[in-house]
Image (tube, coloured by chain):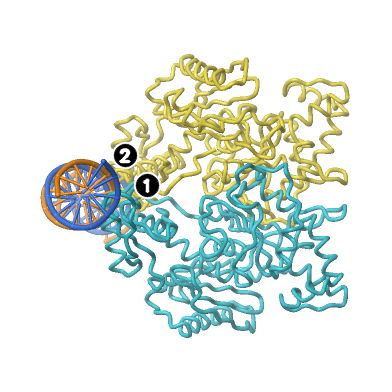
Chain colours: A yellow, B cyan, C orange, D blue
Amino acid sequence: MRSRTDIVAGANAERARSHNRQVVLGRIRSAGRIGRAEIARGSGLSIQAVSNIIADLRAEELIVESGRRAAGRGQPPVQYALRPAGGFALGVEIRPDAVFAVVLDLCGATMGAERARLPATDRATITRSVVDLCDRVLTVSETPRDRVLGAGVVMPGPFGPTGLAGSGSELLTWDDIAPADWFSAAIGLPVVVENDANAAAMAERIAGVAQGLDSYAFLYFGSGLGLGSVQEGRLVAGAHGNAGEIGHIPVPAGGKMVPLESRVSRLSVQRALQAAGITVTDGEDITRAYAAGTPALMAWLDAAVEPLSAAVAIVENLFDPQTVILGGAMPNAILDHLMGSVRLTTRSVSERAGRAHPRLMRGASGRMTATLGAAALVLNQAFTPQIVVQT
Amino acid sequence: MRSRTDIVAGANAERARSHNRQVVLGRIRSAGRIGRAEIARGSGLSIQAVSNIIADLRAEELIVESGRRAAGRGQPPVQYALRPAGGFALGVEIRPDAVFAVVLDLCGATMGAERARLPATDRATITRSVVDLCDRVLTVSETPRDRVLGAGVVMPGPFGPTGLAGSGSELLTWDDIAPADWFSAAIGLPVVVENDANAAAMAERIAGVAQGLDSYAFLYFGSGLGLGSVQEGRLVAGAHGNAGEIGHIPVPAGGKMVPLESRVSRLSVQRALQAAGITVTDGEDITRAYAAGTPALMAWLDAAVEPLSAAVAIVENLFDPQTVILGGAMPNAILDHLMGSVRLTTRSVSERAGRAHPRLMRGASGRMTATLGAAALVLNQAFTPQIVVQT
DNA sequence: CGATTAACTCAACTTACTTGAGCTTTAATG
DNA sequence: CATTAAAGCTCAAGTAAGTTGAGTTAATCG
């Protein structure tokens, strides 16, 4: 969710510098290791300008020298790489019954993870739990606090009063206050707030299978089903931050139309198994049931294929992504099974020769995807230039 | 369609100025008339910087003084407005059998429109027709050529070799060459290329019902059905410029799944009427048939409601737009009928209290929507700051 | 009518990028 | 092996375009 009053800001020397820093950082990140001259060529800046920025970044210990690379004639460039300990990002995920937190370093490696039960869902309790957990994860991971760039906070959508309220997926509304400002004041760091699917999508870009991709979609299994869509490196948010509510679109299932997430979601698996007298509480239970070939689970899988295939077809045709990623709160075995069963229609803009990526991929971030994604939002922001200020 | 190698460029003084010019122009455009101090407050620039830019824009005759506005105490600000004749945009639409061209002034008013039959669809013929038509429309409308900012070219998508090739909707592929560069060289102006639905969406933003909107979706009736989606003022293009192929998604129709555009499109109306022995060639025929209550047309309308409702539900939940606009090559009477019949589900992120815009709106640009949109792309670019260069 | 407020201009100042000269390091060439 | 070319890089001067602060003009308020 973002302020709906974003404005495009004018540029001055200072903002240009900040923009250029992000351009340079972003290039170092995406290249892994890169020399100054190459950054200059790629960004349209002069070598001197890049040199100055590199000097700044080195002084701040955000980057390190990383050898030279002989490349034909001429003096081999000094290469630079991100210094992992140069910056850290907090990621917080708020679920109805628990709070999770992680710390990532600048390269996206996980430095620590903590969780806490949420005794109540009033705002004060949530805020206290979040603040305490952030403190704990930073302490336990021995993260230097002055190097924490910011925090991402993930809450299940949708945000604000919509027709989906009461669906059981939303946690609570924060109508009277901007959650980002609220948490920013509480944690004492810059905060970005997003829904789980969007954060999960960003997690894959920072440390998962979407590295190097600019336009892709992530089908996120939470309690429901969400879609995080990245276009040109930016999340598609919608007018109120509620884009991607794919779980609520009507899809065909055995001849009638049902909401997608009634057939394809964590909750729907649990219900299907419950109806067969089997109670599952975590992913391991489901994995075991799958390994055992439990009929109720197999039936659920069979029933999920048609609506999921329809959803993939819709996503492909509406967003023209480089790939569609499946991930979230579902065991890999189930995701793999679904990926193998989904019928990819040939009548799609995604059916094209010379694809660099498969049409379907499995997310790499596992169960903590959304929490990692929360932190990834912060890192992505650090690497994405944006001359845009909020009023 | 856009280059897939966009890079984020570094900022220098010159690029900052160009960015700031666009910020200022954009604010003048969206406000209609506005004073310098207000622009400064809204953009984060100093009054002096805005003053300098305003002086430049006045010298170039892109804007004019537009009176003073007494606003409480203090010296009333001198207001500025766009000077319509300060700049012009060419819009070209290439259809399988014809080429259309329009000229818009800086405020989006139509200065002239021309059309020509397309004798063949090879590249040379198309190029010649486009160049000739551009020349003609500029001559007839007496547009000063040195004030033409650029040209938008609209071609039916999808672009490149996709699984939708052969659907009859694509005109021809330009695999070996970037169409924008090609036409730019031929016309001698900067050129943007887009598909019809995206251009139509932009037309509504420049001169239609989407003025002032940042995030909305446009369901475009071409020969098929397309979706143009604008998010934060930018078109959602997809990895290969083929986002929005909504006509090809499977939707329910009378118990089975069919491609949306087989029930909701210009072609599908014509087929439905043809099957009843009625041949329609233009919108007027359809309007008359509607006025006469022609049973085949009424049956088509009835059959279109369910799939169209599903499509709207999908668009609302995936994009969370401020509104969904219906328009394109379909008479207003039909669009109005459809808008009245569509069932808007309450289980949608778009079902929210205090909406500023209705969930469905009819496009204002009429049959020339896509051609106007082609020109609107150019104007939008003139008003949208973007420190992004193409390699 | 004076005080206050706001818009605006002028001139000095500052930031950060660019440019050009020159140095260093490597590979290719004769 | 010496020479030349090519590429990376630094230093210092130059420049574009923004900001700042003082001062002017033109309204409203009391």
Residue A184: x, y in percent? 45, 28
Q: Amino acid at mark 1?
A: Ile
Residue B219 horizontal/vertical position (percent) = 66, 59
Sequence order check: which comes first, mark 1 or mark 2? Answer: 1
For mark 1, what is the residue? Answer: A39
Q: Quadrant of residue B156?
A: bottom right
Image x and y of residue B99, in percent: 59, 78
Q: Nearer the viewer, residue A218 or C30?
A: A218
The image quarter containing residue A283 is top right
* Mark 1 to mark 2 CA distance (whole Å): 10 Å
In the foreground, B239 or A162: A162
Is residue B1 something that shows in the picture?
A: no
Neighbour tally class for label 2: few under 14, some 14-19, many 20 plus, Cα within 10 Å: many
Q: Quadrant of the C terminus of chain A?
A: top left
Relative placement, left or right, of A366 versus A271 is left
Image mark for residue B341: none
Q: Return the residue at label 2.
A: A54
Is A318 left, or right, of B376 in this rendering? right
- Residue A368 vertical placement versus B273 (above, below): above
Chain of residue at mark 2? A
Up the image or down, B284 lies above or below B224; here it is: below
